[in-house]
Image (cartoon, coloured by chain):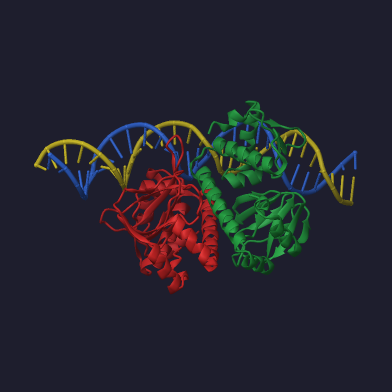
Chain colours: A green, B red, C yellow, D blue
Amino acid sequence: MSVCAALDPDELSALNRLAHTFCVNAKQTLFEQDEPAGNVYNITSGSVRLYKLLPDGRRQVVGFALPGDFLGLSMAEKNAFSADALTSVTACQFSRQDFSDMIDKTPHLLRRLHSLASHELSLAQDQMVILGRRTAEEKIASFLMGLRKRWAKVSGASVTIPLPMTRQDIGDFLGLTVETVSRLMTRLAREKAIVIVPDGVRLLDIPRLERLAET
Amino acid sequence: MSVCAALDPDELSALNRLAHTFCVNAKQTLFEQDEPAGNVYNITSGSVRLYKLLPDGRRQVVGFALPGDFLGLSMAEKNAFSADALTSVTACQFSRQDFSDMIDKTPHLLRRLHSLASHELSLAQDQMVILGRRTAEEKIASFLMGLRKRWAKVSGASVTIPLPMTRQDIGDFLGLTVETVSRLMTRLAREKAIVIVPDGVRLLDIPRLERLAET
DNA sequence: AGCCCCTCTTGATCCAAGTCAATGTGACAA
DNA sequence: TTGTCACATTGACTTGGATCAAGAGGGGCT
């Protein structure tokens, strides 16, 4: 999801001249759904929860942003979702205006943006398949596999992956309840498909990839 | 979803010079998932089903394309989903190459494309909310409301809307079975929220918008 | 006409996941 | 230390929607 690798050094440094460093602590809000979109962010460290709320309080998490990910690239007038920090987060912040000007000067960049947006759309459609046509166990498995893959891009492949989000967050991402998430994670651990590292349950080993990959 | 209205006459006629008219009958395939993407389509008449298949045959419909909609704008190497005609369909067809050249000549157009893609992403996220956090009845209701709105853009507001897709298609879009879709539509009709016009159940009146809008 | 096939409906039954409730556990504050 | 609070787990039970099964049209074919 990181576009950084896709940018020329010149472009990157041009962008960096426009950037402000932005820091928030865990649980703080980056921006809220339906508010006028003011900025573009590139996450430098930490993780962010992206979600939509229904009027009655039900919540759908539409994604998690990890280091390298961009937020606000749609250049829409209003934010399509709320975003808040799961851990303390640092990000590069650009104003929409600066970013927009930058785009006008580098048509190149716009192509990248479009291909990024298309890729995100494709991921959203994959998530639609997961939400609509997968069982609870398949949902958990594909979530863990996907997260593992994303962490691998950020910090290199590893059997141990961090889960910066709560069980509730995972449930709200997969259309499940906390209890179901907890039960299935325990079951996967009992079956030795995963190991819940006893540091406070937010760290996970996936020693038997093939057990999870049975999708 | 139509970008036509968003294009200048000059741009539109430039596009049209590149276009071939494309016709298929109901149930014919426009393109298939994972095949190299060859063309961009702008639907002129008829409706198209967009879907992904799981290896075991489960299907997730990711959307329906109506007149005015574009397909293949992502410019990705491969199709993210399959598309086939629900009714007989006519479309303007552009080759990827021509379309890509056109984009290079009109940076303007690329901005539109990006904003279109962002809008689609936002719709996909709304669909994630529906799939993950809505009850079966809410799913049906929001589907019908959404379809009504889209037909209104194509052919003007009307209480009567066509359902070119089968109950199975609706189920595969909403993460439900045919039986559940059928039962709920019958129930909504019994409660007089909708009227299933007796022409072969593929035409629908929504006389009591507010009954459905209780979301 | 008669036949096949596809779609839709409806009923009876089942089960995966939700709900409700109790308990555990670590972090942090007073 | 004790209390509070947020998160996680586990068990008992309930239920919405799935599954299974049986018709009912309707359209196109010969």
Q: Is residue D25 left or right of residue A114?
A: left
The one of A201 and B188 positioned closer to us in this rendering: A201
Observer-nearest of A25 and D26: A25
The percent position of residue B8, horizontal first and vertical second, equals: 46, 73
The answer to which image quadrant residue A56 occupies is bottom right
* Residue at image coords 60%, 60%: A108
Q: Total label count?
A: 0
Quarter where residue B153 is shown? bottom left
- Most extreme residue toward the bottom is B9
Task: State left or right for residue B167 relative to residue C20.
Answer: left
Residue B128 in view, yes or no: yes
The spot of residue A2 in percent (x, y) is 66, 50
Left or right, D16 with respect to A73, comes to left
Using the rendered image of the protein, determine whether residue A36 is visible from the camera's viewpoint: no
The location of residue B94, given as percent across then percent down, is 41, 58
Q: Residue at 60% across / 43% down in the picture?
A: A177
Residue drawn at 64 percent across, 60 percent down: A72
* Residue lying farthest to the top in this orientation: A191
Q: Residue A28: where, in percent of width, then height?
A: 74, 56
Q: Nearer the viewer, residue B172 or B189?
A: B172
B91 relative to A127, above or below: below
